């Protein structure tokens, strides 16, 4: 946790820790849904599901197993 998060948590007491925990859950859920998309192995661009080629660099995206 970075310094700003600790400062908020200590300033607001128990509610601060709850806020920090909620933000952590939201970030986790947002990144978990992005992982389900197709990520290019070359440039790491997130592509739509079902894409055959990367929208950024044109690399062929291998079929999922």
Image: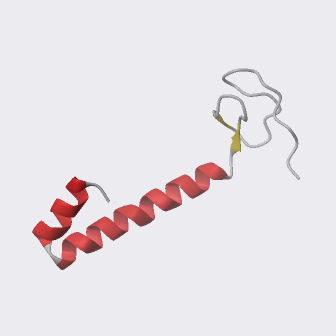
Q: Is residue 17 above or below residue 4?
A: below
How many numbered discs?
0
In the rendered image, which quarter is residue 18 located in? bottom left
Percent of width and height locating residue 17: 25, 72
In the rendered image, which quarter is residue 50 located in? top right
Q: Is residue 11 above or below residue 64?
A: below
Q: Is residue 46 above or below residue 31?
A: above
- Say which residue appears at 60% left-offset and 55% top-offset: 33
**Left or right: residue 38 compared with residue 3:** right
**Left or right: residue 3 compared with residue 23:** left
Percent of width and height locating residue 6: 21, 63
**Left or right: residue 55 compared with residue 61:** left
Q: Quadrant of the N terminus?
A: bottom left
- Give the farthest residue toward the top: 57
- Say which residue appears at 34% left-offset and 70% top-offset: 21
- Say which residue appears at 44% left-offset and 57% top-offset: 27
């Amino acid at each position: 946790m970075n310094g700003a998060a600790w400062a908020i948590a200590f300033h607001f007491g128990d509610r601060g820790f709850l806020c920090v925990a909620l933000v952590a859950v939201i970030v986790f859920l947002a990144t978990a849904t992005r992982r389900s998309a197709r990520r290019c192995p070359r440039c790491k661009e997130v592509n739509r599901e079902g894409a055959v080629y990367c929208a950024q660099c044109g690399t062929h995206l291998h079929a999922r197993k």
